[in-house]
Image: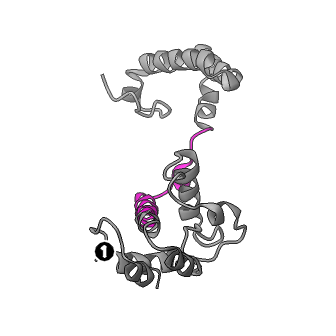
Amino acid sequence: MNDITQNNFNDDPASKENYPYNRLLLFKMYQILEKVDLPNAELHCFHKNILKECREEQYPLLFEELTLESEKILTSVMRTVEYIIMMYVHLTKSYKTLSNTQQIQIEQHPYSNFIGFSLNYESDYEVYANYYLTELMSYDHILNLEKFHTCKIKPQSLTYYKKMIDRYKKYQINTYLTYQEIREILG
C-alpha cells in the first residue's frame, strides 16, 4: 500500500491504485469531524458528501482550508522567532530578580519587552510570533506582551533582534542575567 498522502488527482493510473482506500479513510474522518467539531459540522458534511458521491471535480475544495505551498512559513523563520522569544523569556526571568531601580532603568529601553515585527516588511515573522504566543499560549504568563498586542504599527525589528541574539549568545548558559548583561544585550 502506498503512502496515504499521495496525490490522487493526477492522470497516472498507478496513483489511483489506493484511491478507494484513501477516499474511504477521508470519508470516515469527515464523518467523525462532523460529529465532534460541531461549529464546523456543515463544512465537514459538505466535504464528506463530495467524497461519498465521488465528485472528483470538487476534490480541490477539500484543500481550501490548507495554506498554499507558496504561503507557508519557512522553518528558518519559525526557529528565529522561537529563539528570540526564548531570549526574551530569559531576559524577563532575570529582570524580575533585579531591584526596582534597575527594573525601571531597563523598562526605559524600547526593546525591554518583546514588541513583535513589522507587518509590512517582516510579515512571516509577525504572523508566526502571533501564532506562537497567542494560539499556542506559549509564555504568555511569563512575558509582558502588552506592547506586542497593542502596538498597531511596529518598527522593523528583525535586524535589531538579530544583534541582540549575537550579544546574548555568550550569556545564554547563565541561569540569571545580571543588570549589566541585560543592558548589554538590549544595546
Which residue: 31% across, 69% down?
A: 172
- Residue 149 located left or right of residue 157: right
Colour convention: one colour
Q: In the rendered structure, which amino acid carries the disc numbered 1? A: Tyr
- Residue 43 located left or right of residue 157: right
Residue 186, position as x, y percentages in the image: 47, 80
Q: Is residue 149 above or below residue 182?
A: above
Question: Which quadrant would residue 80 be assigned to in this image?
Answer: bottom left
Over which residues does the magenta segment extend?
65-89
- Residue 131 located left or right of residue 85: right
Considering depth in this image, is 87 or 61 the residue closer to the camera? 87
Which residue: 39% across, 29% down?
A: 15
Q: Is residue 102 above or below residue 149?
A: below
Residue 14, position as x, y percentages in the image: 36, 27
Give the secondary structure at mark 1. loop
In this figure, which residue is indicated by the disc labeled 1?
171
Which residue: 43% across, 67% down?
A: 97
Q: Is residue 39 magenta?
A: no
Q: Is residue 71 magenta?
A: yes
Circle 1: is it few (<14), some (14-19), or many (20+) Cα within 10 Å? some
Considering depth in this image, is 148 or 57 the residue closer to the camera? 148
Residue 54 showing in the rendered view = no
Residue 10, position as x, y percentages in the image: 48, 34
Residue 119 showing in the rendered view = yes
Considering depth in this image, is 30 or 127 the residue closer to the camera? 127
Which residue: 59% across, 25% down?
A: 56
Question: Which quadrant would residue 74 be assigned to in this image?
Answer: bottom left
Residue 41, position as x, y percentages in the image: 67, 21
